[in-house]
Image (cartoon, rainbow, N blue to C red):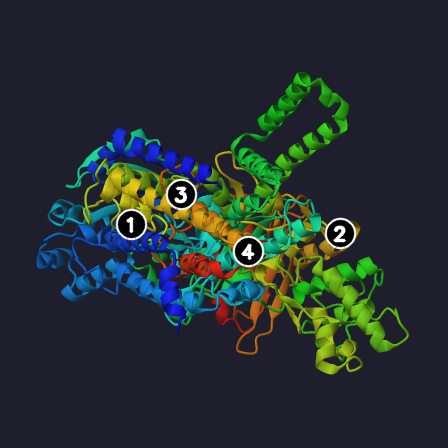
Amino acid sequence: MQTIFFVVAAVFALKLFFIQVLNTEYKHAADANTIKRVVEYPFRGLIYDRKGKLLVQNLPVYDLMVVPKEIKDIDTLRFCKLFNIPLEEFRLKIKTAKAYSYVKPSPFLQKLSPEEFASLQDNLVEFPGFYINARNVRGYPHQSLAHALGYIGEVSPQKLEQPEYAAYAVGDYLGVSGIELEYERTLMGKKGVKYRMVNVRGLDKGPFKEGQYDTMAVAGQDLVSSIDLELQQYGERMLQGKRGSIVAIEPSTGEILAFISAPFYDPNLLTGKDLGKNYLSLLRDPEKPLYNRPIKATYPPGSVFKLVQALIALEEGVITPETGYPCNQSLVKCAHGHPYPSNLKIAIENSCNPYFYQVFRAVVNQGRSRNIYQDTHLGLDSWRDHVLSFGFAGNLGVDLPYENMGIIASSRYYDKLYGKTGWKYPTFYSMSIGQGETGATPLQMANLMATIANRGYYVTPHLIKGIGPNQQPLPDYQKKHFTSVSSRHYEPVIEGMAEVVASRRGTGWWANLSHLGIDICGKTGTVQNPHGKDHAVFAAFAPRVNPKIAIAVYIENAGFGSISSAPLASLMIEKYLTGTISKPRQRWEGWIENGEFYKSKN
Amino acid sequence: MERAPKISRNIDWITVAIYAAMLLLGWMNVYAAVYSPDLKQSIFDFSINSGKQLIWIGTAVIIIIVLLVIDYKAYESLAYVVYGLIILLLIFTLIFARPIAGSRSWLEFGTVRIQPAEFAKFATALAASKFMSTINLRQQNWKEHAILAGITVLPPVLILLSNETGSALVFGAFLLAFFREGMSPLILILGSVFVAIFILTLLVPKLYFVIAITLLFALAIWLNRRLLRKITSVVLIYAAVVGMVFSVDFFVNNILQQHQQNRIKALINPEADPLGFGWNVTQSKIAIGSGGLYGKGFLEGTQTKFDFVPEQSTDFIFCTIGEEHGWIGSLVLIGLFMALLSRIIFIAERQKTVFGRSYGYCVASIIFFHFLVNIGMTIGLAPVVGIPLPFFSYGGSSLWSFTILLFILLALDTHRKQDLTRA
């Protein structure tokens, strides 16, 4: 055993003799006094729209860094005057920097503009211990799409302690919300590090060991968004000064073409030196511009939900396209004076409430059990399974964080409220017309339109269609999710939706584009709002054959959907399909843009 | 009343002297490591590590007195009790400790933190020695072997669970002590082969490695035709080795999380991660290498100040010695360790009980392992494993634990003449 000890001791002594006495390389390295570790920040990935327009870019900014150990005899007063900070702040900042580290650089003043940088650069020689560190912040050349893009912010101390954030250091930026957060790993790239030998006077003596330990910064990968910037900006212009949202999807691919939440803000506010200040003022704004309506706001789906009711009833075989029900106002009120709903098409076209009251009851109470309570239980839950297959009451899986699930009440919910035998169909009949214990986000509603447009399936809606130079698509967004309603039942419903827009009696007549040869299939809806005027909804897809766009438009407090969200949806569709707005329809632009519909009696 | 003069007469003063010398040098170098030429703090300044280390040294002296005054027979009779308590403490720590720097291994009492893993070393040494004194390792009794393995493996498993890889590895040192007590050298060889395969799997591409193993086996059979008669066993061993290569590969690449993978890969090959462990080794080598033959002088080091070398007063304390005292200083340190280890072996061999002897070898093995890995990592001969240099590194838990480890042996030795029989 002693032999082992002495062999090890001898090996150590020998190795030490080599590196301490024989080898001079290490002495040179030490004579150079310090090996400085220069971190190179990678370019964060850029984001383009579907036509190659730049949505997010990088802009250079400059941080003033300080290494407390290297501060020597500086003229503090002159420094404060030059950088325009009070003396107390200077002392406090130095103290904070010392508390972090004596020898590692810490940020002293952050995000100087290029102009400030230029004026300071020459004076910096007088202040040993202070350095300029150049890096990039995000810039948004079009001021659009703030809610989807999100923003980046400084990494928090709590995160730095976690192993998943090992690649970050104090002062680094990472995605805090939106695409910036969701695709952080793709966008961030990899920091590079260069080891330079620097002598006592701070002079660069070249790379350490010919740079064999150096690594190159690897730029983050670029993303290609599915967003059509032109359509996005058009929608933003239309919703300017209003509250609401628009989500447009390409049905066959699930690619989101427009993603608008109004009121919106300029994403450039959340970059640069004033991020914190601007964030607070946006947060405190009573209009809540930070609220991401398309995925966060859940509204009762309203009359649009009647389409789902019809589809499920057809699948369950309780109605046929030819089934008629009386417009019995004693069951539930029906606002529209309309012809007798002798078939499904007429019922959809006129959005007849009593019709769907009866359809829903036929779906729920099919006599699965002789006990009426049991029957209702079974019926409600089997109906709910159908509804969930459309992506309701669950996360769709859009590539944005914090998606709201929405709700569709289940039998458990009513059991809790009323007991197992305390409720039956009349308790929840209002779900038949999309009111009551239902809630869906605008994204889920647009997805419903895409599902109907595809005759029975949807592809998870997503904002990023390609990654990197090859525009690699994401496998998650290639899959078709089929609903539990078979595809042959869609056509009769679509028939009704076409009539909604095509017929002069239809609730969506103001969305008609037949003069352009575009047949829109849509459905109006009204979201009852106990706090004020109802919210107007219009959901649609077009064209009827081989659909190219599915859309859901919400305008809050606009009353009836026919005169506000329906024309807006058709403007969006026209813009996307033809690239322009035809002459006879330009008056609608003014009607929407100026919010004329608010003045209407409805 | 009679005991005190007896202790002072019989205690092994040579060991005590080496111990004292190490503490003194360690303390001075901790001071040198944290000394700032700008601030010029005193070595007694309690706000820096050297001042705090003085408190630890003072408490260590109290511990020594207690250890020597306790009835020496208690160490053997209470060995399992102490072991059991430490195991409970480890479990308690694992469940209740607040994670500090990703590891749940510290217990906090106000501002004082202790690391129970450090104390598991002497407790395991006591329990293992006690068990060895009741069996004969030379006999191939698999049940006894299994119990002994259990005693030694349980603490490192608990420590590994708390994310303290370094402290867990130390328990491998017990194999050396078992070897002295008659354990078959086959186990040492098997252990080394296992470690070699593990490391090579991570270093060499899997396919080449498997081809190399295949060729090696083929060569062995070609050279020694008699192996053909035992072809079943040969094929089984071959399958086991290849199986291990794949399972290690699978374990590291598929089961471990990314940051754990990086850590293991960096451990094997620090240059693959110049930002992390590789950086430490480079800085540490520059510091030591710049010391030259005589060193730069006390407090004159430039590389080991502040953050150029990480953990300079704890795990990388040797850098300060290497830089400020040069090759001569390094030799003195190595010499001190050799003297201490030889003396411990000498003391172990003169014990009259198997318990005493085994314990002595455990102490020597543990200290040796720390010496081997700690110095090895600072000069780039061993992977970077965060374990302290005994008696030199700053830190209360480690100083206390090594003091207890060593002075239990001295307590046993002081009273050795009272044991009449030797098993």
- Measured as percent of width and height from the top left, residue A432 is found at 72, 70
Asked whether the beta carbons under mark 2 and mark 1 sit within 8 Å of each other, the answer is no
What's the distance in space between the residues labelled 3 and 1, CA to CA? 14 Å
Q: Chain of mark 1?
A: B
Mark 3, secondary structure of its residue: helix
Residue type, numbered disc 1: Asp
Front position in the image: A293 or A116? A116
- Checking the image for residue B277, the label placed there is 3
What's the distance in space between the residues labelled 2 and 4, CA to CA? 89 Å
Q: Confirm whether circles 3 and 2 share one chain.
A: no
Q: Earlier in the sequence, mark 4 or mark 3?
A: 3
Q: Chain of mark 3?
A: B
Front position in the image: A322 or B417? B417
Crowd around label 1: few <14 · some 14–19 · many ≥20 (10 Å) = some
Asked if A43 appears above or below B395 in the picture, the reply is above
- Name the residue beneath numbered marker 1: B307
- Name the residue beneath numbered marker 4: B355
- Checking the image for residue A491, the label placed there is 2
- Measured as percent of width and height from the top left, residue A224 is found at 49, 42
Front position in the image: A503 or B83? B83
- The residue furthest right is A370
Crowd around label 4: few <14 · some 14–19 · many ≥20 (10 Å) = many
What's the distance in space between the residues labelled 4 and 1, CA to CA? 45 Å
Residue type, numbered disc 2: Glu
What's the distance in space between the residues labelled 4 and 3, CA to CA? 40 Å
